[in-house]
Image: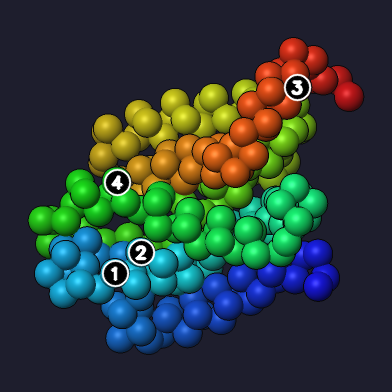
Amino acid sequence: MNQSIITYILIGITAITSFTAFSNIELLNKMIFYPYEIKRKNEWWKFITHGFVHADMQHLIFNMLTLYFFGRQIEVTFQALFGNEWMYPVFYLSALFFASLPSYLKHKDNASYRSLGASGAISAVLFATIIFDPWQILYLNFFIPIPALLFAVGYVIYSSYMSKKGNDNIGHDAHLYGALYGIVFPIVFKPQLISYLIEELKHPRFFN
């Protein structure tokens, strides 16, 4: 199998579904993450399907560009690390679920709360790349260079703060717990990564 084909498939499915849902409110309502109805109607599939619809083009493009740049890297890494191509889609889809779980527990009795988008899984993919190369240079908003480790610390602090503040329509809980899942998932299956990460952190490469 082509080493990046699953990333391309995920991007393709997400783009097509999101485009369709932009003008199909019925489809959007069937897929959107709505804890109140999930609890009362057992619509558990929405833990996954909400990651394949987006609020608008900007939301979709940002998430899919991030998945394109980092998903391919993690797909190849996971194939080498685990010896098969299926750990990556399992990781991605389960990240959608686990990143949304705290929001479900928080909002299951809140009839006004809904969310959508792949941001939880995207955060997991991004933070998984940081585990394997914490000193790589990331580009904030695609053009501001920043060491990955510094970005990770800032991302967690910002997401935690905004989650507690709770005055916008962004799923900061999903960002935060998706990031945590991106760290935990590979370590659970390969505990040796803890020693690897410690060694990497001992040797900063800011100027490489």
Spatial CA distance of label 1 from label 4 is 14 Å
Residue receiving disc 4 = 102
What's the distance in space between the residues labelled 1 and 2, CA to CA?
A: 6 Å
Residue at (60, 64) in percent of width and height: 89
Q: In which quarter of the image is residue 128?
A: top right
Task: Residue 13 in the image: state x and y as whole percent.
Answer: 58, 77
Specify few, some or many for label 3: CA neighbours under 10 Å numbering under 14, 14-19, or 20 or more.
some
Pointer 1: residues within 10 angstroms few (<14), some, or many (20+)? some
**Residue that numbered label 2 is attached to:** 47
Residue identifier under label 3:
200
Quadrant in the picture for residue 30: bottom left
User: Which of marks 4 and 1 precedes in the sequence?
Assistant: 1
Q: x, y (%) of residue 168?
A: 30, 46
Between the residue at mark 4 and the residue at mark 2, the CA separation in whole angstroms equals: 11 Å
SS state under label 1? loop
In terms of sequence position, does the residue under pointer 1 or pointer 3 come before the other?
1
| Image-based side of 21 in relation to 46, left or right | right
For mark 1, what is the residue? 44
Mark 1: which amino acid?
A: Trp
Identity, as a three-letter code, of the amino acid under mark 4: Pro
Question: Which colouring convention does the figure follow?
Answer: rainbow
> 43 or 126: which is nearer to us?
43
Q: Nearer the viewer, residue 141 or 120?
A: 120
What amino acid does circle 3 point to?
A: Glu
Residue located 68% across and 41% down the image: 129
Marks 4 & 2, CB-CB < 8 Å contact? no
* Observer-nearest of 20 and 71: 71
Q: Where is the N terminus found, in terms of image quarters?
A: bottom right
